[in-house]
Image (spheres, rainbow, N blue to C red):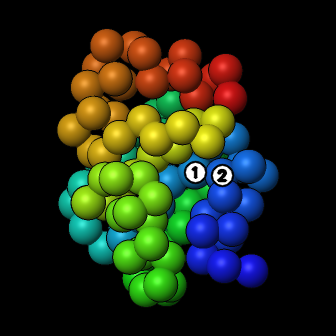
Amino acid sequence: MSVIERIENQLNNNPVVLYMKGTPDFPQCGFSSRVVQVLQACDADFFAVNIFEDPELREALKEYSNWPTYPQLYVKGELIGGCDIIVDLYNKGELQTLVASA
């Protein structure tokens, strides 16, 4: 299975996917930590992928998403954005609706 197929498999089989540095229990950057906190505040059920464990995926995802930084949040296979966008959506009350609909 190619790395793109693995990404598409993760996105197709999990309604909410967070590509992050570290894990939800041990985030390895402040931005990833903040997104995990926001998702937990929404009671979101999400699948997390530690990009440090898969360098091939880490590089391929930047091209796949056309988004150069992490974390990256996907809902129903669609890139929502990184930390600033996610926090903004949360503050507007839109993230809660988005993840609840997934």
Q: Is residue 17 visible?
A: yes
Q: Residue at x 31, y 13 (%)?
A: 92
Quarter that holds the C terminus: top right
Q: Residue at x 42, y 36 (%)?
A: 80
Q: Is residue 24 visible?
A: no
Whole-percent x, y for residue 61 in the image = 44, 65
Q: Residue at x 45, y 24 (%)?
A: 95
Which quarter of the picture shows residue 55? bottom left
Q: Is residue 41 above or below residue 65?
A: above
Whole-percent x, y for residue 35 in the image = 36, 47
Left or right of residue 35: residue 15: right
Q: For the residues marked 2 and 1, what is the alpha-carbon distance in whole angstroms?
A: 7 Å
Question: Tag 1, which secondary structure?
Answer: strand
Quarter that holds the N terminus: bottom right
Whole-percent x, y for residue 90 in the image = 36, 24
**Mark 1 is on which residue type?**
Val
Q: Is residue 46 above or below residue 55?
A: above
Q: Is residue 26 above or below residue 85?
A: below
Question: Tag 2, which secondary structure?
Answer: helix
From the viewer's side, name the closer residue of 95 and 55.
55
Name which of mark 2 and mark 1 comes first in the sequence: 2
Number of numbered tags placed on the structure image: 2
Q: Residue at x 47, y 84 (%)?
A: 56
Q: Is residue 38 above or below residue 35?
A: above
Q: Are marks 2 and 1 in contact (CB under 8 Å)?
A: yes
Dot 1: few (<14), some (14–19), or many (≥20) neighbours within 10 Å?
A: many
Dot 2: few (<14), some (14–19), or many (≥20) neighbours within 10 Å?
A: many
From the viewer's side, name the closer residue of 74 and 92.
74
Pointer 2 residue? 11
Pointer 1 residue? 17
**Mark 2 is on which residue type?**
Leu
Whole-percent x, y for residue 20 in the image = 41, 64
